[in-house]
Amino acid sequence: MYCVDWLSWFDAPEYEFARQVLQRGVAALYFVAFLSSLNQFPALLGERGLLPVPEFLAGFSRLRRPTLFRWRYSDRLVRWICAAGLLVAALLVAGVPQLGPPWVPMIAFLALWLLYMSIVNVGQTFYGFGWEMLLLEAGFTVAFLGSDQTDPPRTILILIIWLVFRLEFGAGMIKIRGGREWRDLTALYYHHETQPMPGPLSRQAHLLPKPLHKVEVLGNHFAQLVVPFFLFAPQPVASAAAAVVIFTQLWLVASGNFAWLNWIAIVLAFAAVSDPVVHAVFPVIPLDWHGETGAARETPLWWQAITLAVTLLLVVLSYWPLRNLFSKHQLMNASFNRWQLVNTYGAFGTVTKQRIEIVVEGTLDDSPDDSPDWREYGFKGKPGDLRRLPRQWAPYHLRLDWLMWFLPLRTVHEEWFYAFLGKLLEADRGTLRLLRDDPFDGVAPQWVRVRSYRYRFSTRKEFRETGNRWVRTLLHEPIRPVSLRRSGGRRR
């Protein structure tokens, strides 16, 4: 009798819609991640990249960072890995592996996890973002949701909800413990303008009245510090809590570009949404996914054993992030094991009050001091051209543009940035493809220089008068003109 009760609790047939969203959604984000790596990894980290992986591997600890590149790296190999990841992810999005027994989608997701982990673990600063480990953890956990031949396992759904809780509550606690602007509700006076990569609606969001910005912050605190607890509540409360998470994440999608961070939060939140609630809100979505003639699904004991073993593993690994959530010295975006499972998350504990942009210029003239013809390199995502409307890039990740935002917060004297300047002086084609605009059409400049500007969104009146969406003020020149032909130049 107890065994029958356990088996009936273990299976969660009322969460079939959630499983479909979780499996296909996470696979779609893996597709985006592999596409981003295919397009950018060789130029950033390849054999002739800004931070070449072969040099990194020379001092690499094989015991700490699992990667397929531990034996050998080549740009061709990383392209093959990305191509394999794209193929497997596309099949999962189409639902093909899910048609087979539960071990088939499990193998597919674990392959994505291991392939992408191999890239992340040699990606250095270009892959040092919290959403990388979030995607890895999500891929591993979703691997054990089973297939169309079995009901979704309830323990795995609970673990995914626990992941959403850590993501949301961790971010909320980081803010409360962080800058005063989150506690006095003024954070969004600045954040829409100073965030790493504004989107097409960011300026309009910034120009909202300040009382609405305070309402935004209050809503953020409610969504991140209160709502996550209700994800564990009975239905329909849990679905309502998930709806709040999804709505707030959609607002973040609309007002900025944060790679796949917001999108994966939206996907994972569906773990708390049950089929009856979905059917009640959207009657066109069937309540019974298998129809009246669908065969009853019976979960094999061997599959239950696997999912319970994984559940036990992830519960044990939860001790360290749980302790971190309530620590006075809370870590943000940290992993406690080399497999990057059950991590701690958080973002923007403090908000920058001014937007400082690093602008790179070049000239074809022999003498930089007398040159009147300095031309600015244009980036795909980060602000540059004052009139240009920012694009919506997320969930695609522009890694070079993101690191450019960090330069004024740290130092422009980064190894990779000097390597980047050297590549511009060589007119390196791979590097130039990372940019939106090469002002010299493939011709190598004689000199490049770096200038620092303060950017702010134009007011409505300024926009009507000039057509400029940004106003900028020159601050200083942190790197004076350098050339490959002169002693001031640096070359990799």
Image (cartoon, helix red, strand yellow):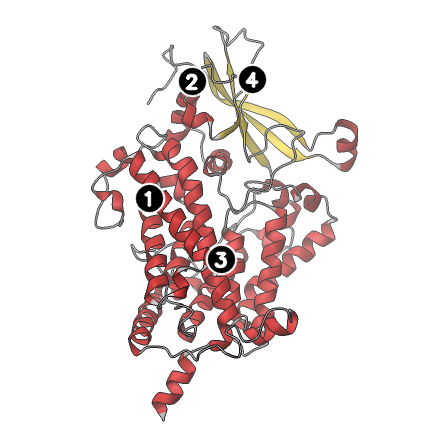
Q: Nearer the viewer, mark 3 or mark 4?
A: 3
| Mark 1 crowdedness (10 Å alpha carbons): few <14, some 14-19, many ≥20 | many
Residue at mark 4: 375
Marks 2 and 1, how far apart at CA: 31 Å
Whichever of labels 2 and 4 marks the residue nearer the N terminus, that label is 4
Residue at mark 2: 425
Whichever of labels 3 and 1 marks the residue nearer the N terminus, that label is 3
Q: Is residue 147 visible?
A: yes
Residue at mark 1: 81
Residue 457, x across and y down, in percent: 67, 36
Under mark 1, the amino acid is Ile
Residue at mark 3: 25
Whichever of labels 2 and 3 marks the residue nearer the N terminus, that label is 3
Residue 96, x across and y down, in percent: 42, 59
Marks 2 and 4, how far apart at CA: 13 Å
Residue 382, x across and y down, in percent: 55, 34
| Mark 4 crowdedness (10 Å alpha carbons): few <14, some 14-19, many ≥20 | some
Under mark 3, the amino acid is Gly
Which of the 4 image quarters holds residue 122? Answer: top left
Residue closest to the eye, 439 or 320: 439
Quadrant for the N terminus in the image: bottom left
Whichever of labels 2 and 1 marks the residue nearer the N terminus, that label is 1
Identified at 50% across, 10% down, the residue is: 364
